[in-house]
Image (tube, helix red, strand yellow):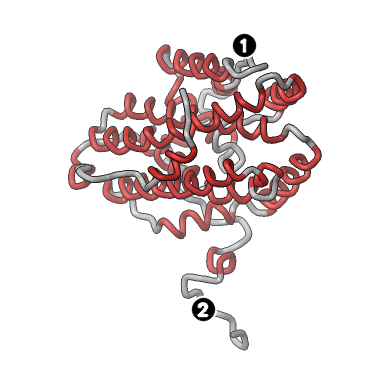
Amino acid sequence: MSFSIERYKEESKKVDITGIAWDEVAAHSLSKGDLFSLHYMMDIENHVPLYLSHLLVTRACMDPILTAFLACWNYEELWHGENIGRLLNLYGIEFDTQDRIANVRANLGVQNSLSILTTMAGSWLLKNFSAVYLSIGAINELTTLTGYNALIRKSGHPVLKDLLSRIIKDERRHYAFYFNSAKEWLSGNERAQKLDRWMLDRVWVPVGQGVKTQEEVDALAIYLFDDEQGEEELLDLDAKIGKLPGLAGIKLMSRSLYAARERARRNPRWGQRLIENEEWAIKPPKKSPVGQLTGRRGVPQEAGTS
């Protein structure tokens, strides 16, 4: 698995949706679990610009290769979320994409600002921060494409399969960049390897956790991977990440699945109740209305203001 940043810059573009049978989306059914998964995935794809904002205040932004990759990566991820949202709209689920994105961000509250500050401080204090970031990037991209493949298998929806298969091609390139960059940083660097292992064992969380609650994360994991094939896919994912220097034998995604199973064992309704009650529908922001948060969308202003 190799990666050329120059080739990537030349070839980067929004996902090609030519020929997708959008008019057939509603002709094939999706389960509540499929819909829950798609809402989760759409929200996280649309969260990428905020994740990028965290990285651009770290020492990682000093690397021109990394910033070139991030510029292209951010643009490509934008279209993943846009097209998943389009499919949901065509299936008959009505929502305004911009409202949904703004509400998800509003619900983060002060958590997002604190996360930026801690990431910035940690990166400038830790010389090998980039090794950790690159390893997490590899894990997250591999998890994402594995999740998309699992949803293709679960749903059996031909149009969704076509769309996600095209998105997966982007995610594979993203994974290749992160994996190769992490490998280069970690090779022969014992300090970086020790820090990377320590941080991943103690700090890493599955894709979306923080934006989504623990129960929402568990609901997705159990729906997509709580069968023999799904468990094998996560064990294979861990094995691939374990090929990075210093990470042999590490268990991350499989450990998360086992933890989700244990929480569901203690509470049989855990996770499943969110899917059955369709609580994936966006909740109103806890503190900041969308118009107040963004200053947009034609929200009436109070008397005497301009």
On the image, the x and y values in percent for residue 106 come to 58, 56
The residue at which mark 2 appears reads as 300
Asked which quadrant contains residue 256, the reply is top right
On the image, the x and y values in percent for residue 105 come to 57, 53
In the shown orientation, is residue 77 left or right of residue 292? Answer: left
In the shown orientation, is residue 25 left or right of residue 235? Answer: left
Residue farthest along the front direction in this orientation: 6
Q: Amino acid at mark 1?
A: Gly
The residue at which mark 1 appears reads as 249
Closer to us: 127 or 284:
127
Frontmost of labels 1 and 2 is 1
Mark 2, residues whose alpha carbon is within 10 Å: few (<14), some, or many (≥20)?
Answer: few
Of the numbered discs 1 and 2, the one sitting upstream in the chain is: 1
Closer to us: 6 or 31:
6
In the displayed structure, 256 sits above or below 65; it is above
On the image, the x and y values in percent for residue 268 come to 52, 23
Placement of the C terminus among the 4 image quadrants: bottom right
Asked which quadrant contains residue 250, the reply is top right
Disc 2 secondary structure class: loop
Residue 66 seen in render: yes
